[in-house]
Amino acid sequence: MASTYKSIRDIDWPLLLITLAISGVGVLQIYSATHETKWRDAWWKQIVWVAVGLIFFWIASQIDYHTLLGHAYALYGISVLGLIAIFFIGTRVFGSRRWIPLPGGVQFQVSEFVKTVLILLVAKYLVDLKKDDLDWRELLKIAGLIMLPMLLVMKQPDLGTSLTYLPILISGVFLAGLRWKYIAIIGLALALVLPIGYHFLHDYQRARLTSFVDPAQDPRGSGYQVIQSMIAIGHGGMWGRGVTRGTQTQLQFLPVPHTDFIFSAFGEEHGFVGVVVVLGLYFLLLMQIVQNAQTAPDRAGMYICMGVCALLLFHVLVNVGMVVGRMPVTGIPLPLMSAGGSNTISVFLMLGLVNNVRLRRFVN
Amino acid sequence: MVRLFRNTQHDPEKLGLEPKPFLRDDVQRSAGKIAVIQYGTVAIFLFLISGFWRLQIESPDVYAEQADRNRIKSLPILAPRGKILDREGRVIVDNHSSFSVILSRENLKEEHLQPIADGLNLDYEDLVDRLKRFRKRPTYEPIIIKEELTPGELAFVASHSDPATFPEMELIRAQKRLYPRDGFGAHFIGYVGEVSENELNTAEFIDYEQGDVVGKQGIERQYNKLLMGVDGQRQVVVDNRGKERALLSDKDAVPGKNITLTIDLDVQTVAELAMDGRRGSVVALDPRNGEVIAMVSRPAYDPNRFAGRILAKDWKEIITNPEKPMLNRAIQAQLAPGSTFKPLMALAGLETGVLTPDFHVMCPGGASFYGRYFRCHLAGGHGRVDLRKAIAQSCDVFFYTLGNRMGIDSIAKYAEMAGLGSKTGIDLPHESEGTVPSSRWKMRNYREKWYAGETISVSIGQGALTVSPLQLAHAIGGIATGGIWTKPHLVIDETAREGARRADIKLDNVMQVIDGMDAVVNGGGTGARARIPGLEVCGKTGTAQLASNDVLKGTSAGRKMKDNAWFVGFAPNDSPQIVVVALFEGGEHGNLAAPIVRDVIKAYFDKQVRADPTNLLASLPAFKPGVIPPRPAGPRPPKPTVVQISDDIIE
């Protein structure tokens, strides 16, 4: 492959700057939430992950996305194999196998990287159709391709991450074109299947759903996290309690204040004003991605950008919705803010893809 | 300069992409849908921000308060109640440290109650009831569920109050009341207990809250405000494991004030022992200032049983006991005084002028009044009886005649002057008034006029006349001091003398009555058993019938009711320092109550002798080094008064 070097000035600087701004807020909040706990190293580890993420961002920008699309099925095959491998060599943490141990003590969460692969896969599949809308066979085929890794991840069990694959599929199918009749039938089918699916959920997952409806029902159990999170956010008020001053966060009433509930810790310490600012940054980030989709040189680029957009939007909606008590507890991280290597790198990887599309937006 | 994008190295066919060149127009086809996603994104962000708005802007106080409740733990520091001391500062009622368990109700799990109840040996139903009673109190206030933990219960709490097991439980130190054993002084001391829901609705307890420990009876109740301290509070910041992170405030408890009683423990002890195994009461007053030196009521109860949380079963047992151990007979008994009323009759006779110096009565063993025959207690009769002999021998016929001449309203006037028929005003709750019958009293209560025949019974302290031992001591004490009635009181009060009530009675008349009472003890009268060599003890016996008329006496129930024995005595005769009333219920004859009074008076004066160092030194031999001192010659120093409980009552 020929050199694909692009000028550093072509990089989507707004995208990168917003990304780094959010990451910076995340690192500060991780520091504030953990400086007196056993996770007190998490903030500088997160800096390392962001740095590693930037490398991946660069790599993902450099290889022309068309090349990547060309290997989409191969990547997909590797991903599925990786997910299967987890059941044999995965590390078990809190009763679920999600990680493959890498040399150097680093844990590699396969399901996070599958997201990128699925974005490519959906783009590749839909572009290949060369049609204005999908018929049943095509719809079921692409859905099946997504469902396989979803089921594998669900089995780990990791319901939250597996659900994040859905918006990739939905946004892709929506953009590719779906007849209203299909949408109606799918809606009906879901309405029938969901109650049945509820029975196949684990007890803790069910408890999360019921406690979402009424957290006060079980204030010590699964409702506890949500109640504490809402108290923390409410405690923040308009201006927040100040860095390292949020009692809910500092006294650890807030569960995992540096990962899943980081935004709740942020809300306590920085108040409504801080929340609006950071949510504004996320909004700008998403709009920048959408803008890249709109200016993409082809539909493949557009699918990639919108896939990333849908995935990140889903993450923000579910995570922030959860900490504010408007979504059930699913345990998915807030992109760029929650401490964690795999997720951070995965997000940078996806944003690298978006940048990749942007770099190649001028056709002919 | 922007480098233009070159895409020539990709063969669209090879990549399997659309064969057409990549054109903007192609992408534009989805522009509408992308716009939908954009609007959706805006909607989602507004949805999320509205969530924050609701929590952070609309009701931040609610959550701020909850956050504080999370982190701030308040532990009560219970204030110890003031001690109750005797007149010499000796401790009668003390506190002892113990552990209590408090239950936090904020995060209480229903299913934890049963194991907690089991571990603390509590009744599950009681515990649930208790929680129910506190439901009106804010939940962040913990409640005490068990006091005075045994070592076993202590171990249970220590090992189960961790966050993982029963985090609701918490140990606190408490000061518990420690009362004398065996009901010693139980009635005037009273006891403490948790304020009840009914009490909370009364004016007396308006300032208290559910769960407060207040005085329920006796001194504990009367002086509750003084005795009760102010509880302190310790506020700490805790983390989610309940570990203390910082101290917010530490308000020490303010202990209650100590109270010094007028009770003399030595005299009280003698009185308690004298009444041991008997039913009745002893009251010893200093008539000069109204100080209560001893007050006994038997049977008694053990206030320590109330100090903790009394079980419903035990409570029922105590209040249904036919002996009425809870009754403070000293102030609540309402019994006919019998012949102990005669000194008052005598004084009334002298004051009204009916009893002239040459007034005398022939006693043939009874006399008829208004068609009915009234017996004298001495069947053979007393012969010619003057005032002195009438009091000394307790001649009924003399007083029948006197009373008949005076009429009921004169008797009532002097009885009331002496404080009968109304509360003495002692600083104890629930004092009884007793009854002084009069024509007005009868009209008011029975809507009937007084029959002169009824006066005859009242003349010897029977009939409708009822008094409490305290009232009698107060009345006789006032006569003994020449017509000055000081309000009886249990707590040292230097100003008590100023509130004394003076009656305009002639000292000469008083001397005549005292002379008669002297004869009761020292002049061959009915109260010879009250004699103390070297001390002029005056007194009066009384044998009061419970069933005051002969009709009831004839029934089997009436026969079972044994007469109450009374004795009232004071000493010394010319300047009385102590007046003692003994009521020995079912004691049959007043002379059986006399030794009780004697012992109490003796204890009182023995103490004065011992307290005088010159007396002590005189009884000790001179000290010579190396020589074992011989036993002192002459009379031995008085034995400890406790041992000197007379046995002659049990004949």
Image (cartoon, rainbow, N blue to C red):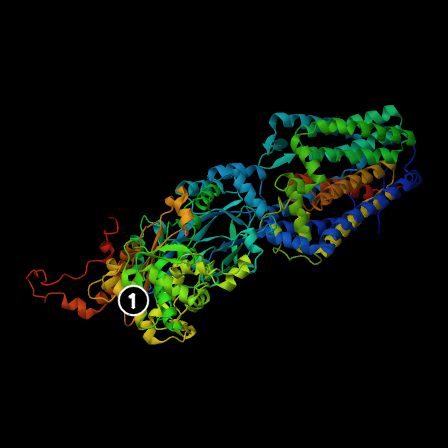
Residue A78 can be seen, yes or no: no
Q: Is residue A308 left or right of residue B457?
A: right
Q: Using a 10 Å C-alpha cutoff, classify the residue at mark 1 as few (fewer than 14 neighbours), some (14 to 19) or many (20 or more).
A: some
Camera-side residue of B55 and A125:
B55
Camera-side residue of B8 and B632:
B632
Judged from the image, the secondary structure of the residue bearing numbered disc 1 is loop
Q: Quadrant of residue A173?
A: top right
Please state the total of marks drawn on the protein image: 1
Q: Is residue B441 left or right of residue A49?
A: left
Q: Is residue B276 left or right of residue B330?
A: left
Q: Reply above or below: B605 against A284.
A: below
Q: Residue at 58% of width from left, 34% of height from top? A: A103
Q: Reply above or below: B470 against A248.
A: below
Residue B296 location in percent, x, y? Answer: 36, 56
| Residue farthest to the front, as pictured | B371
Q: Reply above or below: B107 against B85.
A: above
Q: Is residue A114 left or right of residue B634?
A: right
Q: Quadrant of residue A316?
A: top right
Camera-side residue of B414 and B643:
B414
Q: Residue at 53% of width from left, 42% of height from top? A: B127
Residue A61 location in percent, x, y? Answer: 76, 41
Q: Residue at 7% of width from left, 64% of height from top? A: B625
Residue B532 location in percent, x, y? Answer: 22, 62
Q: What residue would you read off at disc 1? A: B386
Task: State which chain disc 1 sits on.
Answer: B
Residue B121 location in percent, x, y? Answer: 46, 39
Q: Amino acid at mark 1?
A: Asp
